[in-house]
């Protein structure tokens, strides 16, 4: 499965950014970069399927919990394949690339990459409008796969999934970021900081300590890809941008090789060394102070060294 050719690399950005000196190469779709999208849908729990529905579902058994997904009259720029999970094994991202994403109103565009922890990655996004009379803003997030799954689940709930009556002003507005992952529709960005809301352009850098790995409840683990999310929908955050029109996002990604990358345990060694020094240096200095002069065991030696004052008797 390959991306259509009309998503060609963009030669230059709309404004100066931290990515201007990138050595851009053609985007390696489905090899180091994947393109995904979320578009408005209606989730209907009605089990009255048409004959066409039954035919598409084949001989698979259906129970009362099956749900039918019916697309609305949404007429956005996304292709149908963008809403599927490609499931490719992505190579480490080591080449700079530049592309554009056309994103419909109330939709989400995503670029998925496999970040290399030995490189520093800079992402630059500029938002433009397909409607020249409107100057839109949007939200940009960086998420791991696990965080992105929670984000897309919240998007589906907001659009009627599982017959959940969702109030845009309610779910997580009053919940602090560190607790949002424990709510039903809670989600957060990578390190809780890579969220840039109601912006027209943004640039940010990411340096990893090591491969990002998610550990499961029963000990299993999986390497996490990273998702650059351009949100043109009204999500559950309070200060996010409100969609007005279809947008075009110009995205540039630049990777630069880092210098010597120290292993994670060096942080613990340095911190422990500072704590040990803080405790033992006063102890050692106090001991030296208390022992000073004790080597002069006789009063005559102490008097000669002027260690103690003397009083002459007449």
Image (cartoon, rainbow, N blue to C red):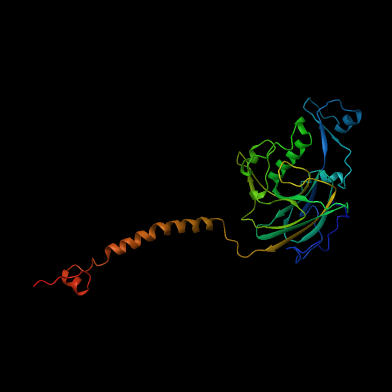
Residue 228 in sight: no
From the viewer's perspective, tell me whether residue 22 is left or right of residue 104.
left
Query: Does the rendering let one see residue 128?
Result: yes
Q: Residue at the right extreme?
A: 51
Q: Quadrant of residue 182?
A: top right
Q: Residue furthest left?
A: 314
Image height check: is 291 above or below 145? below
Describe residue 195's horizontal placement relative to residue 108 as left or right.
left
Instruction: Depth check: give the residue in front, 236 or 253.
Output: 236
Question: Looking at the picture, does residue 240 appear above or below residue 51?
Answer: below
Q: In the depicted view, which residue is nearer to us: 35 or 181?
A: 181
The quadrant where residue 13 appears: bottom right
In terms of depth relative to the viewer, which is nearer, 149 or 224?
149
Residue situated in front as seen by the camera: 235 or 124: 235
- At which x and y percent is residue 191? 64, 50
Quadrant where the C terminus is found in the figure: bottom left
Tell me where residue 231 appears, x and y as whole percent: 77, 47
Q: Residue at x 42, y 59 (%)?
A: 277
| Residue found 83% across the figure and 37% down from its top | 41
Label total for image = 0
Q: Position of residue 49 (x, y in %)?
A: 87, 27
Looking at the image, residue 307 sits to the left or right of residue 68; the answer is left
Residue 88 on image: x %, y %: 77, 49
């Amino acid at each position: 499965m390959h991306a259509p050719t009309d998503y060609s690399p963009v030669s230059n950005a709309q404004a100066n950014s931290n990515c201007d000196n990138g050595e851009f190469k053609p985007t390696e779709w489905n090899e180091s970069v994947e393109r995904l999208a979320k578009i408005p849908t209606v989730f209907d729990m009605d089990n009255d399927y048409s004959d066409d529905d039954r035919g598409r579902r084949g001989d698979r058994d259906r129970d009362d919990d099956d749900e039918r997904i019916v697309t609305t009259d949404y007429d956005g720029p996304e292709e149908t394949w963008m809403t599927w999970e490609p499931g490719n094994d992505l190579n480490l991202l080591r080449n700079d690339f530049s592309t554009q994403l056309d994103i419909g109103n109330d939709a989400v565009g995503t670029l998925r990459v496999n970040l290399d922890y030995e490189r520093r990655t800079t992402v630059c996004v500029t938002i433009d409008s397909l409607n020249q009379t409107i100057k839109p803003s949007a939200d940009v997030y960086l998420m791991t796969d696990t965080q992105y799954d929670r984000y897309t689940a919240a998007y589906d709930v907001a659009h009627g999934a599982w017959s959940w009556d969702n109030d845009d002003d309610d779910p997580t507005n009053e919940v602090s970021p560190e607790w949002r992952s424990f709510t039903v529709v809670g989600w957060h960005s990578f390190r809780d900081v890579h969220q840039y809301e109601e912006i027209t352009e943004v640039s940010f850098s990411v340096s990893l300590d090591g491969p990002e790995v998610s550990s499961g409840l029963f000990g299993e683990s999986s390497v996490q890809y990273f998702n650059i999310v351009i949100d043109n929908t009204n999500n559950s955050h309070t200060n996010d941008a409100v969609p007005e029109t279809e947008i075009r996002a110009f995205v540039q990604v630049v990777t630069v090789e880092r210098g010597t990358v120290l292993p994670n345990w060096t942080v613990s060694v340095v911190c422990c060394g500072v704590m040990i020094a803080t405790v033992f240096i006063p102890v050692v200095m106090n001991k030296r102070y208390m022992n000073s002069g004790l080597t002069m065991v006789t009063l005559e030696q102490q008097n000669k060294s002027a260690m103690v004052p003397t009083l002459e008797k007449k």
